[in-house]
């Protein structure tokens, strides 16, 4: 039955597990503006987002990481969709930043959590464009999370063709844990939608409504 076959991917809901917070939230007097490595470490210690931040590409400049650190600390003050506004502004202001892909993934996770599915899809697609496996092999966890979240959302929205294209890109890639579960569920949903186009109704508005 189509509904039972689709139940697996409908149950794989996006998580949101913020980690430990820096208790002060103020500037770190031990960090210098000319210490890019130290600032990257400081950014990665700010466990305020669901997915760890990993720069992809060259080492971010110290100034860039300092700006991101301020933006991250400002997100602690708000608990709704608006909490990510400083990070989205950072992405706009730094279109070539090595932090961009990881930030887009986290923005998409937040949009998805609050039901902004069109924006989440745009964020995931933009992140994936930067994280195709042959271009960012040093960021495996980031790649796997982005691919699995994008596949899941395509399946939920009944986007068969882009889902098929994505799954083809992932044929030679290995996944484990939650990412593997999501990819398998999205693949099964795609197969069901191909076999029974009517099943796609469960992956569109009906499926989205069931997640509210």
Image (tube, rainbow, N blue to C red):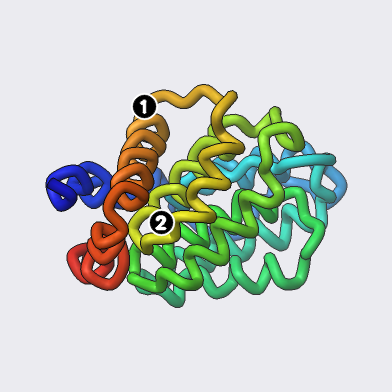
Seen in the image, is 41 located left or right of residue 181? right
Image height of 208 relative to 68, above or below: below
Closer to us: 101 or 190: 190
Which residue is drawn at the image coordinates 71% and 72% (left, top)? 92
Q: Quadrant of residue 100?
A: bottom right
Q: Residue at x 42, y 24 (%)?
A: 176
- Crowd around label 2: few <14 · some 14–19 · many ≥20 (10 Å): many
Residue annotated with mark 2: 153
Q: Please state which of residues 145 and 35 is positioned toward the viewer in this rendering.
A: 145
Image quarter of the C terminus: bottom left
Question: Which secondary structure, mark 2?
Answer: helix
Residue 61: x and y in percent read 84, 50
The answer to whether residue 16 shows anywhere in this view is no
Instruction: Reply above or below: 184 against 211.
Output: above
Return the x and y of residue 86 as percentages of the image width and height: 59, 72
Q: Name the residue nearer the viewer: 187 or 9.
A: 187
SS for callout 1: helix
Which numbered disc, 1 or 2, marks the residue that appears first in the sequence?
Answer: 2
**Residue at x 64% of width, y 33% of height:** 139
Circle 1 packing at 10 Å, graded few (<14), some (14-19), many (20+), is few
Task: Estimate the spatial distance between the alpha carbons at disc 1 and disc 2, rounded to whole Å.
Answer: 18 Å
Left or right, residue 57 beside residue 110: right
Going 22% across and 42% down the picture, which residue do you hit?
A: 8
User: Which label sits on residue 79?
Assistant: none
Q: Are marks 1 and 2 in contact (CB under 8 Å)?
A: no
Question: Can the viewer see residue 62?
Answer: yes
Which residue bears the numbered disc 1? 177
**Where residue 121 sits: x, y (%)?**
50, 63
Q: Residue 45: give x, y in percent of width and height.
A: 55, 41
Residue at the right extreme, as displayed: 34
């Amino acid at each position: 039955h189509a509904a039972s076959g689709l139940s697996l991917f409908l149950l794989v809901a996006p998580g949101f597990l913020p980690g430990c917070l820096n208790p002060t939230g103020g500037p770190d007097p031990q960090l210098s503006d000319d210490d890019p490595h130290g600032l990257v470490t400081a950014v990665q210690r700010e466990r305020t987002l669901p997915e760890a931040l990993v720069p992809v590409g060259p080492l971010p400049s110290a100034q860039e990481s300092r700006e991101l650190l301020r933006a991250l600390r400002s997100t602690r003050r708000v608990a709704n969709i608006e909490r990510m506004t400083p990070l989205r502004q950072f992405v706009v202001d730094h279109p070539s930043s090595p932090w961009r892909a990881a930030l887009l993934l986290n923005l998409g996770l937040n949009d998805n959590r609050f039901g902004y599915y069109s924006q989440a899809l745009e964020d995931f697609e933009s992140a994936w464009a930067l994280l195709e496996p042959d271009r960012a092999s040093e960021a495996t966890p980031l790649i796997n999370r982005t691919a699995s979240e994008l596949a899941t959302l395509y399946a939920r929205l009944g986007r068969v063709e882009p889902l098929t294209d994505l799954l083809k890109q992932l044929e030679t890639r290995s996944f484990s844990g939650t990412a593997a579960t999501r990819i398998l569920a999205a693949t099964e949903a795609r197969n069901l939608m191909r076999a029974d186009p009517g099943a796609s109704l469960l992956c569109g508005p009906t499926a989205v409504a069931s997640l509210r």
